[in-house]
Image (cartoon, rainbow, N blue to C red):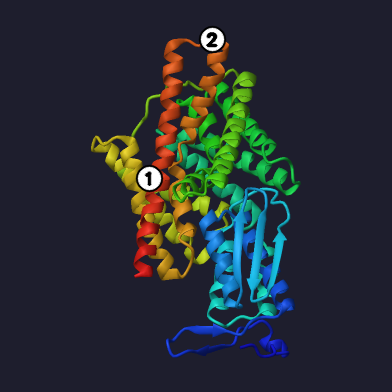
Amino acid sequence: MCVPRPTSLSTLGRPTQRRSERGVADLIAPDAAQVEDVAHLSLLVGRLLLLNGADTEGVQIAVMRFAAAFGCEAHLMVTYEALLLTVVAGDHFRTKIGHRVPAMNVGLTAIDAVNRLVDQAEGGRLGLAEARAGLDAAEHRPPEYARWLVIAALGLTGASLSRLFGGDWPTFAVAWLAGAAGTWLRLDLGRRHVNAITVPFAAATLSGIIGGGAVLLGASGTPSLCLVAPGMIIVPGVPFINGVLDMIRNHMTLAISRLAFAGVVTAAIAFGLFVATALTGVTIPVEAPARAIGVPEDALFSALAALGYAFLFNVPARVAWACVVCGIASHTTRTFCVHLGIDIIVGTLIGALMTGFLAQAFARFFHAPAATFAFPGVVAMVPGAYAFRAAIGCIQIVQQSAAPPLVAETLALGITIVLMVGAIAIGIAVPAVLFAARKIQ
């Protein structure tokens, strides 16, 4: 049974409900104009989430929930560059294709804002007019943190990563300066909409030249980390992790796209570092022994690294401390496992599981997406240094006519990268699946 839709602006788009004898809410069927509005806003919900780093399943669920809140059924196909959406309500339907997605960044404040709007719509507290205003505000919201603060924090993250890999204090200072300079260039080129592959190449080249120059001046006893540590903060850890999560959840098309993009960006960073080594004469060895540090020191620098990523990912200030806790739980747990003689891949899985469960708990407590806490927590464990060395090893194989030891080391690095990224993704996915199953029950 259908009745005319309300005409008051205060009730525009707000679904009217009545309870049947079975307790199921039946929505008044929207008319063609409302279906058009719902389709447009549902597509905007999906686009904002995809642009800001949400995983495929999260995008699909949010769009379906938003459309259902206004009495419509949504069918969404997510591709790497665009969204294809069909919204159906009774005899009315609309099919829309979203604009090309220029690049996938990570903006957890935007994801949090969009998810809150979806929750409000689902609870009947939000009409289409309010939803439109809220989504527009989320899209044009200024960054959570000042640009200079992000640059300083990311420089500190690079410096902290150098200490986590066993670098000395002069290397810490060099990595901070080089990481800050690379971040400045990265943000400036990104603001000018420079090609997404050119940006990390340029940032890695600049940070590598600064790090290599410091080595030539004798400012470091761990020269390779002066180049590698600043480059690690550019590694696209979130696309790597999301790609594996999408693969686990059988979203193969987007999984392959994300992983391919992350791989190309990593190769661009490695090539930028290779250019820096060619200009400065400082080499990055393919085979480099790991230097384990003490657990208390690891906890300190893991916290600083996670804080920098929280600034970069635009994590809301009210929950940034929880990201730091997740960062300590992941990396420090892995370091503790390594001290116990446990393999680093198994230690990575254990650390990621710790962060995955903490992220789910924080998500329930703060009513925020689990990704808000999980990504800053585990991204320091993404094997960026391994990826650089593997890429440089590939270049050296071409130059040295495939020397057997070099081939073996490069192949071992590649396998290690796959296993570590998989361990991180599984560690995040398992708690999410368990919590989702518990919610359904």
**Residue in front for this viewpoint, 119 or 300:** 119
Residue at image location 59% in from the left, 17% down from the top:
281
Query: In the figure, is residue 46 to the left or right of 379?
Result: right
Query: In the figure, is residue 190 to the left or right of 204?
Result: right
Query: In the figure, is residue 22 to the left or right of 123?
Result: left
Q: Does residue 305 sit above or below 66 in this rendering?
A: above
Q: Does residue 33 sit above or below 217 in this rendering?
A: below
Seen as rendered, the residue at the extreme left is 340
Question: Residue 248, percent across and down?
Answer: 44, 47
Badge 1: how crowded within 10 Å, few (<14), some, or many (20+)? many
Q: Which mark is residue 293?
A: none
Q: Which mark is residue 331?
A: 1
Residue at image location 57% in from the left, 76% down from the top:
69
**Residue in front for this viewpoint, 344 or 88:** 88
Badge 2: how crowded within 10 Å, few (<14), some, or many (20+)? few
Disc 2 and disc 1 in contact, CB within 8 angstroms: no
Q: In this orientation, does residue 168 appear? A: no
Q: What amino acid is labelled 1 in the image?
A: His
Tell me the residue that label 2 is attached to: 400
Question: Residue 340, percent across and down?
Answer: 23, 38
